[in-house]
Image: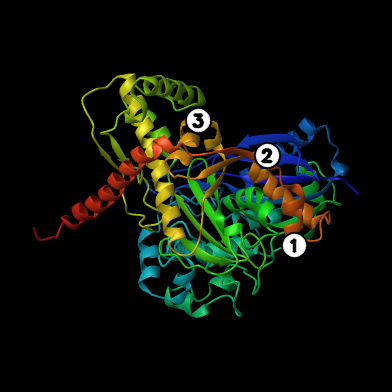
Amino acid sequence: MGELVVGVDVGTGSARAGVLSREGALLGRGEQPIDLHQPQTNHSEHDSEQIWSAVGTAVRAALAAAGARAGDVAGISFDATCSLVVRDRAGRQLSVSTSGEARWDTIVWLDHRALAEAEECTATGHRVLDYIGGVMSPEMETPKLMWLRRNLPQCWAAAGQFFDLADFLSWKACGSTDRSQCTVTCKWTYLGHESPAWQQDFFETVGLPDMLERGGLPAAASPIGEDLGPLTAEAAADLGLTTACRVGAGLIDAHAGALGVLGAYAADRSAIDRHLALIAGTSSCVVALSAEARPTQGVWGPYYGAVLPDCWLNEGGQSATGALLDHIIRWHGAGGTPDGAMHRRIAERVTELRQKEGLELAGRLHVLPDFHGNRSPLADPQAVGVISGLTLDASFDSLCRLYWRSAVGIALGVRHILEALNARGYGIDTLHVTGGHLKNPLLMELYADAAGCTVIEPAAEDAVLLGSAMVAATAAGFYPSLAEAAGGMQRGGRQRQPKPAARARFDRDYAVFLKMHAQRRELDLLGPGSEV
């Protein structure tokens, strides 16, 4: 039997794979880009076959980097964005695109084509809303399926399988049509703490009475880490592995990151609610765990068993964070291509400017970062970004100042979510950060200072891959349970404490941040049809 596992993480722009030991050490890593098709505003699509091919390339590269053989790997698991894959009754691709091309069979998580349908779901007042923060998001699967039925009826009529992307990858790997309790609970209104868990009356109310049957959705979901079976011969060949490799029921990418950084606290449910996972890249997701349900308006959940068994989860987030900083660089006259070199150049110049001006740098410049809506805690996908304090300065330094203050706005958005959670019984004082933002020194500093929390930077090179590997190790039988795998494979981290001297400045910024939210609401009320 092999002594290694493979974790696969599919994000918005690439598929990543890691080969890890049973102790959680990352031995080799591979990555392969994937396409993002955006035929019109608010429409974003993937090709699921290209994703599967990219996964195979990434796994093979990770094996080579680790110097591992196919037979060394005993388990594999997949995490992915909460994107919707549609297949016909024979398992073939079905187009979800207005372009009609069959290859575009996946609606990406960030796609906002179903804004109106999401509002209809919210207007039902159905009790499933009590477990998604009271408001349906267009990023969830039900409104996307409503849109498909209405706008692409030929797709709906031919459909035979609806998958969250992580479940699709498990299906490709071993042929199992099981669905993970993580994916269906968090994105499909499955109530994992009830029986029956699917609320058929809700689907009938929103015009999807045949969704479960047409989508091939099982009556009960599979716990995360459950052994779904061995790799098929075809999948083993695609991935460069063997049919002795077991496949574990996977999870959403952000939740894999949460497992990777919060798994160390799995054995102490009484203290786990002091810790918040912040999975931050193109967008940001925050995940909080507790021993009891804590409904929080504007924050998704509480979800039962969506990361750890017998544990409730609340999930918030920001739809554009890394993407916002990229946008600022493209948008500004002194900007350009938002690559790593440009971000580093800006961060270095901000550091130089702050040596002269300190925390008062661009102190009259304020940014509401809701350029792609407010996921939490306002749950308003129609929200827009706001910048106050612009001048005619078009220099590179003015770009650096705007970038810095945009980063401040992102960090204050995390504080906004954190305060909403703490008002519902959490005692969060520690942020565990993973993802691309670890490479941004300005954001890492601000997550401590502007949010007023201890920040843990994980020792694990890639906490998302680690979380997925914990699932694979459970399926492979290395550990008797997911909680024990999480405890046995956790890697610790380095602490960053907030600077007391920064508190007053960021308290003022936060007061302005809240005032700007209120003023934006007032301006919206003065829109078309309002009385002045």
- Inspect this view and state whether residue 383 appears: yes
Q: Mark 2–mark 3 contact, CB under 8 Å?
A: no
Q: Secondary structure at mark 3?
A: helix
Instruction: Say which residue appears at 54% left-offset and 48% top-offset.
Output: 430
Q: State the image coordinates of residue 33 (x, y, percent, origin top left).
A: 59, 36
Question: Residue at label 3?
Answer: 441
- Observer-nearest residue: 316 or 73? 316
Q: From what the image shows, is residue 198 above or below residue 409? A: below
First along the sequence among labels 2 and 3: 3
Instruction: Say which residue appears at 29% left-offset and 38% top-offset.
Output: 366
Which quadrant of the structure image shows residue 296? bottom left
- Observer-nearest residue: 195 or 293? 293
Q: What residue type is disc 3 on? A: Pro
Instruction: Say which residue appears at 60% left-offset and 51% top-offset.
Output: 258
Q: What residue type is disc 1 on? A: Glu
Q: Please state which of the two labelled residues, at mark 3 or mark 1, is closer to the viewer.
A: 3
Distance of mark 3 from mark 1, alpha carbons? 38 Å
Q: State the image coordinates of residue 378 (x, y, percent, origin top left).
A: 36, 57
Question: Residue at label 1?
Answer: 226
Label at residue 460: 2
Q: From what the image shows, is residue 204 above or below residue 53? A: below
Q: From what the image shows, is residue 63 above or below residue 396? A: below
Horizontal arrangement in the rendering, residue 12 relative to residue 378 (left or right): right
Q: Secondary structure at mark 1?
A: loop
